[in-house]
Amino acid sequence: MDITGLTIKEIQNGFAKKEFCAKDVAESFLKKIVKEDKEIGSYLSVFSDRAIEDAKKVDELREKKSLGMLAGIPCGIKDNIMISGQRCTAGSKVLDNYIAPYNAGVVDRLEKENCVFLGKLNLDEFAIGSSGEYSGFFPIKNPKAEGCVPGGSSAGPAAAVAGNLCTFSLGSDTGGSIRQPAAFCGVVGLKTTYGRVSRHGLIAMASSLDQIGPLARNVEDAEIVFDAIKGKDSMDSTSCGDVEIKTPKKFKIGIVKEAMGEGIDEKIKEGFNNIVKKLGKENIEIQEISLPYMEYGLACYYIIMTAEVSSNLARYDGVKYGKRSSADNLLDTYLKTRKDFLGKEVKRRIMLGTYCLSAGYYDAYYLRALKVRTVIANDFKNAFKKVDLLMMPTTPTLPFKFGERIANPLSMYMADLLTVPANIAGIPAISIPGPEIDGLPFGVQFVAPAFHEKNLFTFGKIFEKI
Amino acid sequence: MLTKEEVEKISKLARIEFNDIDIESMRKDLSSILDYIEKLKEIDVEGVEPTTHSFDLKNIFRKDNPKEFKKDLLDNCPQKEGKHVKTKPVF
């Protein structure tokens, strides 16, 4: 039996029936990583010894007492989330030699559930990118679409799940960085409600937008992982506890009109419409919903996100950690360190953010964008008065080829057109694989009101069966 | 279109050094992105409150309990002396 292709539930069943033990599972994955990840490039570090040790501990504990809900389940963690004592690069050369001094909140929680960590996963530098081509180390390949990018920035987390190199992974989503690669690699990806999952120990990109979430084989697995990592953390003052919500008996689904307009590939529209027709036949209530300000989401995002990036990434100055270039005085140390060790796209966004925040431009760009943010969030609030969930394609196009967009930053940014609005509004969204189009993975996105992840899971499981 | 001088000014503010070729490509890229962002001017935001965070959180406090200084923090410094981070002189 190939253990590496199993879901969390299937592995748990295997444990229960004593078909294999946690050590067998860890070994199967480590073997596969050694054999196949040279080609895919999803891991930046592999915990060969630690994973076996952790798995052995699970096997010993199993004999003695009850274990955590993810006992012996092997996972990979995006390399912008810290695991104490392990290298943590955020995909950047400037943190090439950085050793995490503490665990991220989510890592603490997974450890408590006796999860087995296989290693740290590759990403676009500082989670900035939509193709996996901006990793400071090596690009990631798409195991489900030859010659195509895996999407980004959680390229490693998506590719590792798709390539059966871990059972689930954790990624981070600032403007689509979990959902977009999940769609391109044919796996499930969840962006959680802002504040629902602790950001403590996540290397910050844009703090008002960043959220950690799972990538998994199916909706059920995503839900299991979400339940393990969610909740208030005293180390993240923006995190919050559970909120009571109602799950409807019969879901009302809103099809977002603006997500079927300009900039959306005809093949995506066709594939998406076919799914909508199928849902209609299943007696699911569907109506068209207009989000008139959604088209401004991307422009709004590129001001807020770059502004936050420019301040968050100011810390990479060669003083307290990371790489330092040699220079005669402190100012030149800053200038040269940042020149030598930050990648081109990261520099571009720092520059744009600095410009938008600079004297004379603040009101015209940043303040205006914050107001547009309110307008976009209201769009969603109004829509959720009429429907329970919104539905749209996750991406405007199918997976694109390597090198196709790298020369034109704006065309790369367009890949996030349909995912960015959920981050701006702080609401949860999930990408679930639909039927392939021309042999390529294609993701369908569902968006729910804040704290309504449960509804995404409930309907997501119905959707998977259709 | 941004001027060369404007890009140079931003690069100083951002503390990133660029050579002339990079300045030129940055000028081109930033200008095209800024053109796209202009789109936001189409919206009337008169009287709209800005949103800095998704949720209206009030100050959340916890006790600031001092803990033992972790050696690992200093281990990550490019240069140190004793318990101190060492840098180049400001002047």
Image (tube, helix red, strand yellow):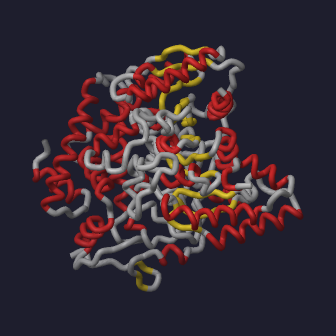
Looking at the figure, which quarter contains the C terminus of chain A? Answer: top right
Q: Which residue occupies the extreme right position in the image?
A: A64
Please state the horizontal and vertical placement of residue A399, each as a whole percent of the image: 43, 41
Q: Give the answer, above or below, for where A105 lies relative to A223.
A: below
Please state the horizontal and vertical placement of residue A166, each as a whole percent of the image: 62, 56
Q: Which residue occupies the extreme front position in the image?
A: A438
Q: Give the answer, above or below, for where A38 lies relative to A4.
A: below
In this rendering, would B22 be left or right of A178? Answer: left
Who's the residue at 43% across and 61% down the image?
A91
As rendered, which of A12 and A32 lies closer to the eye?
Answer: A32
As rendered, which of A120 and A310 lies closer to the eye?
Answer: A120
In this rendering, would B11 be left or right of A30? Answer: left
As rendered, which of A433 and A98 lies closer to the eye?
Answer: A433
- Is any part of residue B46 visible from this angle? yes
- Is any part of residue B58 visible from this angle? no
As rendered, which of A66 and B21 lies closer to the eye?
Answer: B21
> Which of the 4 image quarters holds residue A379?
top left
Who's the residue at 40% across and 63% down the image?
A92
In this rendering, would A79 be left or right of A402? Answer: right
Who's the residue at 26% across and 41% down the image?
A362
Q: Which residue occupies the extreme bottom position in the image?
A: B82
> Which of the 4 image quarters holds residue A19?
bottom right
Who's the residue at 41% across and 29% down the image?
A374
Please state the horizontal and vertical placement of residue A95, each as a whole percent of the image: 42, 67
Please state the horizontal and vertical placement of residue A90, each as a whole percent of the image: 45, 60
Looking at the figure, which quarter contains the N terminus of chain A? Answer: bottom right
In this rendering, would B68 be left or right of B78? Answer: right
User: Number of callouts in the render?
Assistant: 0
